[in-house]
Image (cartoon, grey):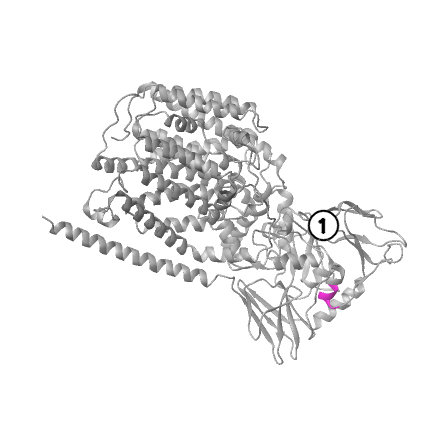
Amino acid sequence: MPNATRTPGSTPPALTPTTVGTAIRLTAEGPRSLLLAALLTVLAVCGGDAVARVFPFGPRHRAVNDLANQFVPFHAHLWDLLRGRADGGLLLDWQAGWGTSFLPDYGTYVSSPFAPLVALFPRGDIEYAVYAITVLKTAVAAAAMTYLLRRLGPGTWWWASVLGASYALCGWSLAEGTYNPMWLDGLIAFPLLCLVGEWVREARRPLLGPLVVAVCWVANFYTAYMATIGAALVLVVRLATADRPADVLTSPAREAATGTAGGGAGRGAVRTLLRAGLTTGIGIALAAPVLVPVFLGSRHAHPGLAREFDPAPATDVLARLLPVTYSFSTPAAFVSTAVLLLVAALLFRREIPGRERWLWAGLCVAVLASMQWGPTHLLWHAFATPNGSPYRQTFVLSGVLVLAAWTGFAHGLPDRRALLGGTAVVTALSLGSLPSPFLTPWALALTAVGLVAVAVALLLPRRGRYGVLAALLVVGTLVGQAAATTAYADRERPARLDDYPPWGAEQQRRADALAEADGWPAYRTDAGLPRVAGNDPLLLGGQGAAYYSSHTPAVLTETLTALGGGWTSRGRNLLSLDNPVTDALFGVGARWRNGEVVRAEPSAPPLPLVTVRPPGPAPAYGRSPFLNQELLLGTRVYEAPRAGGACRVGTEVFLWAPDATGTARLGTYETRLLGGRPKRLAALTSLGTQQREGAKPQVPRGGKAEIGCLDHDRLRAAVAGLRSRAATRVDVRSDGLTATLPPGTKGTAVVAAPRIAGWRCEGGKAGSYGGLLALDVRPGTTTVTCDFRPPGLRAGPAAGAAGALLLTASLWLGARTRRRAEGSTTLSP
């Protein structure tokens, strides 16, 4: 029974325990169905991008939001790590944020098994690499769902391919996953975790099950968490719709292993759920070496904005079930019309047991409703409403709909009555979406055409040319709707989200210039302004202040803000700070400015990474960035403007207007400010040198503004004084640094890096000096060594080892139980 199909109205074939096991073995094979699903997925995604003329098929770029700000730069940094070109390593990143912890970023952005594939591409083609990985992940998700469907029960092989591809081409994948490629690992995780649930039901794969869970959670813990919830719900329904806890268990030994012998289905179901919990727990424990540093890193991160969940209107939710719609704040719930029709028809199929029909339909409704209710919304998102899209779990809904659609194939194809009822339901849902502003004429047209095409395909005979025509109708509906949805999202996304310049000749020239000027660790090279993305040091090179991550340390944001730095994304997206005082403090010897690399003056070379301050208390910052810079420097270098608001001729005029938006001018010099808390903070900026007496800056309105007049002669003298007490040699490592101090040094050694959690120094306790890493130097000390161990580096592996021990124990106990059961079976009469 390789396909187990039947004509409408016929009696379904009887499924004995033996034939069910045979059917599952047969339907789990057949790579053609997996390959077809993957091919349809690639065709739809690339075809839609080509229609929209979006990179890499046209002049329109994909560089929007986090794709440009985080994912491409972090993949570029991974490329550098894999090729041995990065400043730092897996533990410590010396390039971004003046030196930050990288392990939490690794576990959040690039821990996917697909991420290392970037190393196969040239560094200059990093955007091609990320696009290729995005398409590959989507195709693998289609293949994984197809395999799961054929594993769950019989059905026509190409229908499994179509439904598997429908899942991978859901609206969530096409509208959101495409520019958040790390989330696509969750798209793959859901069918894999459902497969683990099947293994648990059958008491099979006790080793592979936890390993699959571990890989899913390491690849992307955030969406794996959502996929785990979804897989648990699917397992409950599978148990509730089965006559026994495991459909294919036939031997007494297997029954003894699962606890079903003599205990009834209820007791067996409870034990199956407990076994599923144990499998999941062991898998998560095995992933702990990555998960624990990520969790603890988020505890030290600058807090994001706390939001209240606002459910989307019902009409908008219905509209997003259709193709060719787009919205950032509603669930992208589109899944092929074929899926919707099959799920709706399931309600009218009397040949299917009522429990099976209503539990699967109820699961679909329950998942959709849980996305709209505040408490369950928080549960889906680990009890924190996201700052961005509030429906990040939508892919689970798409997966549940596909599983429900496949359920009916075990009982044959729907008859005319069921198709008529299903068509009426889909039509009613479409009509209910008419008031939504997100509904487009293309959405209604493609839904209507797809509904007719799929209904006709389901009514056609299964053999010969009619079978081919049916397949073409269904495949055409899937690919056409998905490609159109992709193209529409490609066009809408740049108009609704922040966009950034893509990688091109100018960016390559800038990266080459920064690489030529690089002198690390003797001095830092800053990627400068204007920025290309939120993580320019990772993308372009150098070792600057710019940094954007979910793990941006609070101490880094606070320190940069106190010194006059600017940011967006409510303090998590830090901008480069172009200021002579901070350049001196952080040893910046070259930076990108006005289209070229500008090096430090030979008369004022940059300070080394480690300097020594005289004994005394650490600076306590106030509200003025000018005074804060002087406190950290230890010398007065700014003058207050004279009466009337003008600086002395020859000084450099700096403006601090954190909440202003507009153009600031001084004579012919002008600069653009973009501020306004809580979303943005404009950085301290130069208005050029005061050329004539009495000229006053013109400042845009918006909040408080302060003027500081920098005396460069004083600054050079201050830097010379610090250099006389600075380290004579600094060796940096991927997990710390060692500095050699002049003989007779006393005071406080200050490292030009933020005092983030995880630093430990020999010879004394690592402390903070104005937010920077510092250590009191004892008399006679000539060497300072500091090591960085991110929080969780020990606890994570310890939890992983505990998980490995628990896995070993469970395997041993399981083998022992099976041997005893087999022995008792052999001895029985």
Query: Residue at (39%, 37%) from the top-left corner?
Result: 145
Which of the 4 image quadrants contains residue 92? bottom right
Res. 50 in view: no
Q: Nearer the viewer, residue 588 or 296?
A: 296
Question: Circle 1 sits in a helix, a strand or a loop, which is it?
Answer: loop
Where is residue 376? Give x, y as percent. 48, 43
Side of 376 relative to 465 (left or right): right
What amino acid does circle 1 point to?
Ala
Q: Is residue 86 above or below residue 617?
A: above
Q: Residues within 10 Å of mark 1 (few under 14, many from 20)?
A: many
Main SS of residues in magenta: helix
The part of the chain drawn in magenta is 629-634
Side of 687 relative to 493 (left or right): right
Where is residue 256? Give x, y as percent. 22, 49
Q: Which residue is mark 1?
A: 682
Based on the picture, tell me whether residue 69 belongs to the magenta stretch: no
